[in-house]
Amino acid sequence: MKRFTILASLIVGVMLVVACGGGEENDSDGSATTSVPATTGTVASAPTAPAAATGPDPALIAIGETKYGSCLTCHGADGRGVAGLGKDLIENEFMDGLSEAELVEFIKVGRGPSDAGNTTGIAMPAKGGNPSLSDDDIVAIIAYIDSLK
Ligand code: HEC
């Protein structure tokens, strides 16, 4: 997920500051990223580089914006839902709890009114009712929804 990527780059940035300031990089937290300060810690200007390299992809978001047309009627141009049609996708704990791959699978299947997990009694159609959406299209839509937050 992009939010995780952004979080990870923030952690790397903090660790770089720690590494530059303290001259040591053997602190115990963030074990997955300890190799990054080891290779770049000696470069004074390094802390700004990771954040620039891992930001959201504007091209992907632009594709998602066009594909979001399949969701717009029910979830609204701002993603905040339309009463009686679709839910808010911006402040959404269900979505926050899923990985990108899990969210793609959910959107491909949808959620009928008789599904035990349904909360509104209204159907979320598979692929928003647009069978032509590919997995890549749905990934782009998710990136676009994230960009609205
Ligand atoms: C015909 C209306 C409609 C369309 C079109 C539609 N949705 Fe939905 N969507 C719903 C409804 C209604 C729900 C809530 C179902 C429920 O009560 O559990 C929902 C739920 C969701 C959820 C789960 C939210 C939650 O909190 O459970 C996601 C994610 C979602 N839609 C994404 C999309 C995406 C992405 C598209 C476009 C590809 C789309 N929807 C198109 C009506 C729609």
Image (spheres, rainbow, N blue to C red):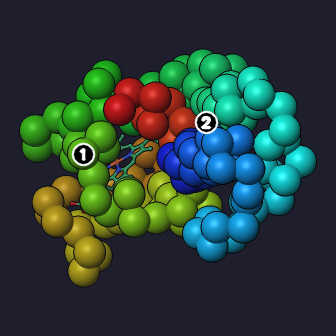
Where is residue 143? Give x, y as percent.
Answer: 55, 36
Whether ligand 1 has any atom under 8 Å from the Cβ at mark 2 is answered as no
Q: Quadrant location of residue 20?
A: top right
Q: Is residue 130 visible?
A: no
- Amino acid type of disc 2? Ala
Three-letter amino acid code at the position of disc 1: Glu
Q: Residue furthest right?
A: 39
Position of 97 with respect to 3 (left or right) is: left
| Front in this rendered view, residue 57 or 65 | 57
Task: Label 1: state its secondary structure.
Answer: loop
Tell whether 136 sits left or right of 7.
right
Q: For mark 1, does the 10 Å Cα neighbourhood hold few (<14), some (14 to 19), or many (20 or more) residues?
A: few
Left or right: 71 in relation to 91: right
On residue 91, the disc is 1
Residue drawn 30% across the image and 40% down it: 90
Return the x and y of residue 121 as percentages of the image width and height.
Answer: 14, 63
Which residue does the image show at 38% across and 57% down from the upper left? Answer: 95
Q: Is residue 108 above or below residue 79?
A: below
Residue at the extreme front: 22
* Residue under the point 50% across and 59% down: 103
Quarter of the figure with the C terminus: top left
Give the residue displayed 66% in from the left and 50% down from the top.
Answer: 22
Q: Is residue 15 left or right of residue 75?
A: right
Residue nearest the observer in this picture, 17 or 23 = 23
Instruction: Indicate which disc residue 26 carries.
Output: none
SS for dot 2: helix
Residue 34, horizontal then vertical, whole percent = 75, 62
Frontmost residue, 113 versus 47 = 47
**Where residue 138 appears, x then y in whole percent?**
59, 44
First in sequence: mark 1 vs mark 2: 1
Q: For mark 2, what is the residue?
A: 140
Q: Nearer the viewer, mark 1 or mark 2?
A: 1
